[in-house]
Image (tube, grey):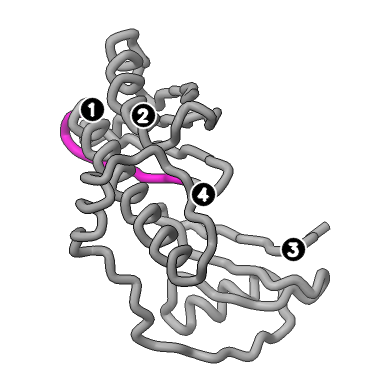
Amino acid sequence: MLNFNIRGENIEVTQAIRDYVQKRVGKLQKFFGNDVDSIAHVNLKIHPDKTAKVEVTIPLPYLVLRAEETSPDMYASVDLVTDKLERQIRKYKTKVNRKSREKGYKAIDFAATDETVAAAENDQDDKLDVVRTKRVSLKPMDNEEAILQMDMLGHDFFIYEDAETDAINIVYRRNDGRYGLIETGDNH
């Protein structure tokens, strides 16, 4: 069962908007089957330029689905984000099941029809080929030094070893220009 946590920023979430989000995003339930319980976290935001941004995050036992779309119309943004999530599911299902068949594992059981699988296999953006490999030596540092290194290199992310915890961490530049930190392992 897909439950919803819908919140709005600079917008009142009316019953009409709530119903539309639940109807459109709720259609994704067909891919999960009835045995999966999850919460769809939906954030609706109106920007000062009157564009509407919709962000949806659905944590599942085997992956986290996340998409965001911005358009001049809230309902159009909901449609776009739902379509994007559906493409993600199809792509993921195709890749995982193909790998599972190759390696002899049991495929993940999405509740998808054969036509859904065929559409995903024919999807042009289905390529996940590695076109370049880099090997890096990780230097112990703190997150401030890692951000400076990232900025000096002109990258959007930087991997480093945390000097205090010895864990491998990642700093990255967010879309809003600020920075994020991903910690791995048992960082305390």
The span picked out in magenta is 65-74
Residue matched to label 4 = 63
Residue matched to label 1 = 74
The answer for how far apart the CA atoms under marks 1 and 4 are is: 27 Å
In the picture, the disc for residue 44 is 2
Out of 116 and 69, give the one closest to the viewer. Answer: 116
The residue tagged with tag 1: helix, strand or loop? helix
Q: Give, as a three-letter code, the residue at label 1.
A: Met
Mark 1 residue crowding within 10 angstroms, few (<14) / some (14–19) / many (20+): many
Q: Give, as a three-letter code, the residue at label 3.
A: Gly
Marks 3,4: beta carbons within 8 A:
no
> Which of disc 1 and disc 3 is earlier in sequence?
1
Q: Could you say where residue 72 lies in the image, as x and y percent from the top left?
A: 16, 34
> Which of disc 4 and disc 1 is earlier in sequence?
4
Q: Could you say where residue 180 lies in the image, as x and y percent from the top left?
A: 55, 58
The residue located at (69%, 86%) in the rendering is: 139
Magenta region includes residue 140 = no
Mark 4 residue crowding within 10 angstroms, few (<14) / some (14–19) / many (20+): few
In the picture, the disc for residue 185 is 3
The residue located at (42%, 58%) in the rendering is: 97
